[in-house]
Image (cartoon, rainbow, N blue to C red):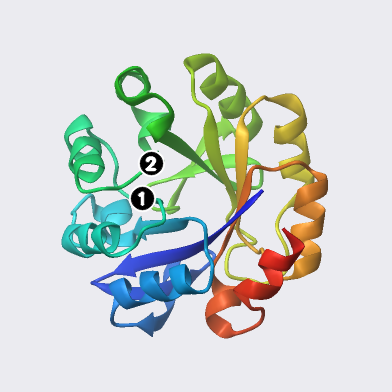
Amino acid sequence: MILIPAIDLLDGRCVRLQQGQYNQQTIYSDSPVQMAEYWEEKGAPYLHVVDLDAARTNEVKNKEYIKKIAQSVQIPIQVGGGIRSLERIEMYLKAGVTRVIIGTAAITDPIFLKKAIDYYGDKIVVSIDAKNGYVATEGWEETSDVKAIKLGHRLQKMGVKTIVYTDIAKDGMLQGPNFDELKQITEQTDLQVIASGGVSTPKDIEQLKQLNVYGAIVGKALYDGTVTLESLLEVV
């Protein structure tokens, strides 16, 4: 199991949203590159970077920051937010990004998703962001009629190897992830599952290990000082 600190970018700054609400944001740093280097120094084996502007509007405002992060750290990074074309995937991979995360387009454009998987294989990760068990899209502002577990089965058949599973109600709330949903998706699919949303204590990590998840993304708890990366790494 790997621990993955999150770096969420909005207007070139590191922020955290509460339950995906853009009007409930906390700014933590004006230097995304320094933040990435900090997490690497603390022992992070991987980084999770999200372009919140692109997720919401499809406008890639943080491209240069993401490129600089990829060039400034030695550890791999995965990038999500507004990944809706093969050109954008290619742009990030050429910039040094290790994996690219497809979210909304996994629901709205399955033909694009299949092409991405065929072209790039395990460099493609799909984000399943759920509200009450249903997949959310468009930067979490819309909810589809697709069940999260049903999408998981569909993705596996398409050749997806890794997903990021986020329960939006848990995100930024420091109340632990949705263990029931994670248990269901890990038991009913062969996908590598990265848990996201609400991970905030060593006990959370212990429970996730018992569910045999592939990784855990940690955000607000690290930035607020609720927990240290070192203490979580000890559990892993």
Disc number for residue 217: none
Residue at mark 2? 99
Q: CA distance from mark 1 to mark 2?
A: 7 Å
The mark nearer the N terminus, 1 or 2, is 1
- Determine the residue positioned at 20% across, 48% down: 95
Of residues 150 and 1, the one nearer the viewer is: 1
> Which residue is identified by label 1?
79
Residue 223 sits above or below residue 152 on the image: below
| Place of residue 110 in the rendered image (x, y in percent of width and height, measured from the top left) | 37, 22
- The three-letter amino acid code for the residue at tag 2 is Arg
Q: Quadrant of the C terminus?
A: bottom right
Mark count = 2
The answer to whether one can see residue 71 in this image is yes
> On the rendered structure, is 186 left or right of 65?
right
Q: Quadrant of residue 216?
A: bottom right
Camera sees residue 200: no
Q: Is residue 217 above or below residue 234?
A: above
Contact (CB < 8 A) between labels 1 and 2? yes
Identified at 54% across, 67% down, the residue is: 43
Badge 1 marks a residue whose secondary structure is: strand
